Every structure is written in structure tokens, then in C-alpha cells.
Image: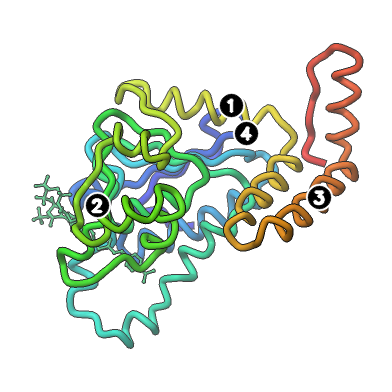
Amino acid sequence: MATEFIKVNPQIEKHIALIELNRPKELNALSRELMLEIRDTLRVLDEDDNVRVIILTGGEKVFAAGADIKQMATATAIDMLNIDQFSTWDQIKKTKKPIIAAVSGFALGGGCELAMTCDMIIASETARFGQPEIKIGTMPGAGGTQRLTRAIGKVRAMEMVLTGKFISAEEALQAGLINRIVPVEVLRDETLKLAREIAKLSPVSVKLAKESVNNTFNSTLDEGLVFERKNFYLTFASEDQKEGMKAFVEKRVAEFKGR
Ligand code: DAK
């Protein structure tokens, strides 16, 4: 697995993998090559039984300043169609294990979309979120008009998408885009803390619960409730459910195996 533009630690801690974007000179601009590396890495980590939670992060100054504008500048619509970068973004969405974005500095355009494609976002006080594509003659193309609107509501999303203005970590928190803000120097530790909490739980239930929450966006309430119910039943087919409830009754800590 080539990892020239990202750094991967499949076991930064027990059951926790870390992916770090690593194109600092280009402010982690998401080139096609970098996105392919993320796609391939996520595929591998999603199949690795030792991994239960994945953290995706950038540097202190920048999470990612968007898709690589220099690479896209002269592309035609047909080039964009043929390159079909969406398969790389689809892989992020398809990943069954939870992905937590740890964002410091700019998360712009594709960078903001990448963070939003993750399941949770922990931000440092320096985080800035924006969809500035409109300023370079285009518009968001990897979920920026959809995930942002669902996360923060129409009028706020409209203002960001139509003006390209950035919002601060505080505004993002108030709008419901991120989980919390932490000092930059403890961003990784705080993200690990959240990852650790989830990694202790049943990987089977975590996957099914993640799938059910995400299904909200593709279904009516009744359809979503039926989907949730089926996943709930399915947890009762796992050894983890038996272990979890037995451990509760026996007043001990459950040991989940992901089976
Ligand atoms: N692409 C390429 N290079 C970038 C870049 C980017 N997005 N952002 C920054 N850089 C490069 C700069 O060109 C500069 O390179 P050199 O000149 O040193 O060679 C270097 O990084 C440092 O940048 P600055 O000198 O500009 O640094 P500042 O601190 O002054 O400013 C900034 C930081 C983040 C405010 C500024 O760099 C900036 O505005 N960057 C562009 C932000 C932006 O417009 N982002 C949206 C890009 S469009 C799709 C999926 C996704 C997308 C599209 C399609 N499909 C699946 C098909 C997404 C599109 C986008 O994200």
C-alpha cells in the first residue's frame, strides 16, 4: 500500500488506527493520489480485525485546504467524469468502522467535505471550516451542499456555500457541525480519548449503530425505524450482546470480541 501523501499507523493504540494527511507544503491539498491513498488505507483498515476506530487528522496549521486546485485547474468536465474521484469519496462513506476527524486549522472545500464525511469531528480552537469553491468559479462537489446543509441547516449552509466565507470553531460548534473544541496541544489526546471509549465497546454493535444513524439521511422516519429495528435484532445474534448483558448482571467489565 503506497502512502506517500499520508502517514498511517494501524495501531496507534490498541484497536485505534491513525491516518495523518502529509502534504504540508501544499496545505494537505487533496490530490487524486492522496485521495486514492486514503481510499486504499480505509479499505485495509476496515478489514483489519485489530482496528475498531479510525482517526483522520491533518497538521496543526491545516487539516486540508481542499482539493488540489492546481491539479483541477485545466481539467474538462469529461476529465472529471473519467477520473471518477467519487469512488474514493464513496469508500469513506462505505467504511463500516467509525472515523473521527481531528481538525486543526483550515478545513476548506474538499477538506471540510472530508471532515464531514467522517462520523464525528473534534476541532482545535484554530479550526476554520469553509466551502470556498464559489470563489474559484465552481461549487462544492463532494457533499458540501448536502452534508453541510444537513449538519447546520439551510440558511447557514447557504451563506457559507454562496459566499465562501469561513466559520470559526466556535461557530461550527454552535451550528452543530462539530462535537467539541479542545486546545490545539491536546487535540490528538482528546480525539484518542473518544476513540478509546468507542474501541472498548462491541465492534458489532458499533458498526450496526453507525449504519443506523447514517441511514437517517436516506430514509423517512418510519423506514429508518424499521432499519434500526432490524439492526437491533441483529445485535442479539452476536456473542458480544450475550457477553455485554452477562457482564452487567455479574457486575464486571464486559470483554467484547467483535463476534
Ligand atoms: N490546492 C493546491 N494548492 C494549494 C491549495 C489547494 N487547495 N491550498 C493551498 N495551496 C498551496 C498554495 O498554492 C501555496 O503553494 P505555493 O505557492 O507555496 O507553491 C501553499 O499551498 C501555501 O498556501 P498559501 O500561500 O495560500 O497559504 P496562506 O496561509 O496564505 O493561505 C489558505 C491559506 C488555505 C487560506 C489559502 O491557501 C487558500 O485559500 N487555499 C485554497 C482554499 C480553497 O479554495 N479550497 C477549495 C478548493 S476546491 C471532487 C471532490 C472534491 C472537490 C471537488 C471535486 N470530486 C469527487 C470530483 C473539492 C474541491 C475543492 O476543495
Q: Who comes first in sequence, dot 1 or dot 2?
A: 2
Q: Amino acid at mark 3?
A: Arg
Q: Amino acid at mark 2?
A: Ala
Which label was assigned to residue 196?
Answer: 1
Of helix, strand and loop, which one carries label 3?
A: helix
Task: Find residue 243 and report its image quarter.
Answer: top right
Q: Where in the figure is residue 92, as x and y percent of width and height? A: 51, 57
For marks 1 and 3, give the CA distance: 27 Å
Of helix, strand and loop, which one carries label 4?
A: loop
For marks 2 and 3, give the CA distance: 40 Å
Of helix, strand and loop, which one carries label 2?
A: loop
Residue drawn where x is 87% and y is 47% of the image: 233
Of helix, strand and loop, which one carries label 1?
A: helix
In front: label 1 or label 3:
3
Residue with the mark numbered 3? 229
Q: Going by the image, does 137 lie left or right of 48?
A: left
Q: Who comes first in sequence, dot 1 or dot 3?
A: 1
For marks 2 and 4, give the CA distance: 29 Å
The answer to whether the beta carbon of the residue marked 2 is less than 8 Å from any atom of ligand 1 is: yes
Residue with the mark numbered 2? 65
Q: Where in the figure is residue 59, as x and y percent of width and height? A: 29, 38
Q: Residues within 10 Å of mark 4 (few under 14, many from 20)?
A: some
Residue drawn where x is 59% and y is 54% of the image: 95
The reply to whether the C-beta atoms of the residues labelled 3 and 4 are less than 8 Å apart is no
In front: label 3 or label 4:
3
Q: Amino acid at mark 1?
A: Arg
Q: Nearer the viewer, residue 131 or 44?
A: 131
